[in-house]
Amino acid sequence: PPPTDCPPDKDELGRSTWTLLHSIAATYPTAPTSNEQSEIKAFMGLFAKLYPCWFCADDFQRYMKKETVRAASRDEFGNWLCNAHNEVNKKLGKPIFDCAKWEERWRTGWKDGRCD
Ligand code: FAD
């Protein structure tokens, strides 16, 4: 659906949010300092509390208790986030995304050059 000037429904909010989160992973340092690692963990913890779809937030917080944020490198955080997104995909009956490709989707563009 085209963007509107109406309040977002949960799908539009979800798409925009995943774009932000995966883009944060795409620019996360390859070798983060311990402070940068603490910050991303604190951000994700608060994000999961404040996400403005309460039942989505409840489930996501439960997931994060089971699968705590891993962020020792860009690769590790990108994969952690990809798996978290796949958990939501599974719940919604959406296709599972191949996490080997998260960087092509969100950082480098696809190897076939279509994003160049
Ligand atoms: P989205 O899932 O929004 O994905 C956008 C794009 O990301 C895709 O087109 C694909 O290119 C890429 N992508 C897909 N999977 C991955 C992956 N694993 N890793 C990297 N890239 C990927 N909706 C509900 O109805 N119920 C919920 O409980 C719910 N919980 C949510 C929890 C969170 C934290 C967030 C951010 C969103 C949640 N949503 C929920 C919204 C839902 O995830 C989708 O955003 C929404 O259904 C729109 O789906 P979409 O098909 O446009 O693709």
Image (cartoon, grey):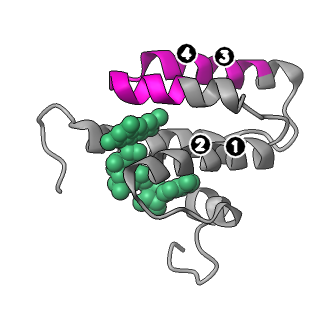
Q: Taking the image as drawn, is residue 44 in sight?
A: yes
Residue 80 to residue 2: above or below: above
Q: CA distance from mark 4 to mark 2?
A: 16 Å
Q: Amino acid at mark 2?
A: Ala
Please rate how many residues cluster around mark 2, counting C-alpha atoms within 10 Å: few if below 14, some from 14 to 19, many from 20.
some
Residue 116 image offset from top left, x and y in percent: 54, 74
The answer to whether mark 4 and mark 3 are in CB contact below 8 A is yes
Q: Which residues are magenta?
A: 38-61
At x 48% / y 53%, what residue is drawn?
90
The answer to whether mark 3 and mark 2 are in CB contact below 8 A is no
Q: Taking the image as drawn, is residue 108 in sight?
A: no
Residue holding disc 4: 46
Q: Secondary structure at mark 1?
A: helix
Q: CA distance from mark 4 to mark 1?
A: 17 Å
Q: CA distance from mark 4 to mark 3?
A: 6 Å
At x 13% / y 44%, what residue is drawn?
4
Comes first in the chain, label 4 or label 2: 4
Residue holding disc 2: 84
Q: Amino acid at mark 4?
A: Leu
Residue holding disc 1: 80
The answer to whether mark 4 and mark 1 are in CB contact below 8 A is no
- Mark 2 sits near ligand 1, with its Cβ under 8 Å away: yes
